[in-house]
Image (cartoon, grey):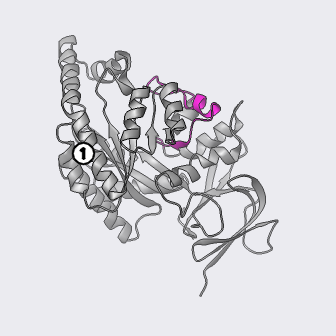
Amino acid sequence: MTNELILTNARIVLEDEVIEGTVVVRDGMIAAIDHGRSVHGEDFEGDYLIPGLVELHTDHLEAHYSPRPGVRWVKTAAIQAHDAQIASSGITTVFDCLRMGSDEDGGFELGEMRSMADALAEAGRDGRLKAEHLIHLRCEVSSADVMDHFIEFEEDPQVRLVSLMDHAPGQRQFQTMEQYTLYYKTKRGLSDEAFAHFVARRQEASAIYSKKHRDAIAAICAGRGITVASHDDATIDHVEEAKGYGVRLAEFPTSMEAARASHENGMSVLMGAPNIVRGKSHSGNISARDLAENRILDVLSSDYVPLSLIHAPFVLAESENGLPLTEAIALVTTTPARTVGLNDRGAIRQGLRADLVRIRHDAGVPVVRSVWRRGRRVA
């Protein structure tokens, strides 16, 4: 028996235009897209119908699992709380970031993230999850133990994205010491002497470990067909290095120069949706709106605020020198899906998965009214 869903009287955001019409879903797939209203089906009352959002980088699960310093929540409960917020924000595919490697900024014990991945897989098998969850391993390559953590995921098919990160001071995100001092000295109340030792240790670890760990992790990812992301690239040399590692996603470049070079070299440039909503970076780096205006922004990530992923495209579409709505929505749907090889979703097109979101937006923050994954309503 065919399972059919009809969504009508909607403003349908397609890849190159917005039409008023009807979408027919059969057995979880988009079967037809028609202009005009149907006498059958769910009346959208003129609301937008967009593809389900694809989130490539969110640290939000970590916040549910460790809501306070030293506190560890029940993993399944943390996953369900995270999933509920993700789905209600219109995200139907999410890459949950798991931290690989501990450093002076903290981290998780060996085995904790492996256990979290097992809990994610079990929750999916048990039908507990509204969104589809995949794994993004955030590898702190300057950490002495990053390979110990990474090797626990060597055979895990959930891993579809790996980022190569180095947060040592004096380069990339922390090219100047002002923000680093705020993050690690002022907030921790370190003395000048203690902070100087802290900085020296981080820089020494970066010099010892970063390159050899980048080489090892990138080689493993190439062998397994896992998408590799660079992180916080600041210079042309960083971009050239990323090209050598086969990077397809440039996360949070910190300079216009690096962002432009990454985009021109075929990498998808990812920036934070909170950066768009706030109009600036929380760490004092380049504005994502400037990248959008220069047409060198390809992907948005909610990073630490899930609802920002649906809010930011409407901010861009309504801002002066902003993007057409179709292009703004592609930043959170079509392009992220293609970047990681998920070619079965990310657009409203016949034959693709019926991952769909109903949005009411007149002004201000858009309202997510309904969410479907594979044609089944999940929120």
**Considering the numbered disc 1 on the image, is that residue within a helix, a strand or a loop?**
helix
Q: Could you tell me residue 148's position as x and y percent?
A: 17, 48
Residue at image x 37%, y 57%? Answer: 225
Quarter assignment of residue 19: bottom right
Quarter assignment of residue 215: top left
Residue at mark 1 = 216
Visible in this render: residue 364? no
Residue placed farthest to the bottom in the image?
A: 1
Q: Neighbour class for label 1 at 10 Å: few (<14), some, many (≥20)?
A: few
Q: Is residue 270 above or below residue 234?
A: below
Q: Is residue 295 left or right of residue 65?
A: right
- Dominant SS of magenta comes to loop
241 and 198: which is toward the camera: 241
Q: Is residue 137 above or below residue 214?
A: below
Q: Is residue 271 left or right of residue 60?
A: right
Q: Could you tell me residue 320's position as x and y percent?
A: 72, 30
Q: Give the magenta range.
A: 279-305
Visible in this render: residue 282? yes
Q: Is residue 198 magenta?
A: no
Q: Could you tell me residue 159's position as x and y percent?
A: 34, 56
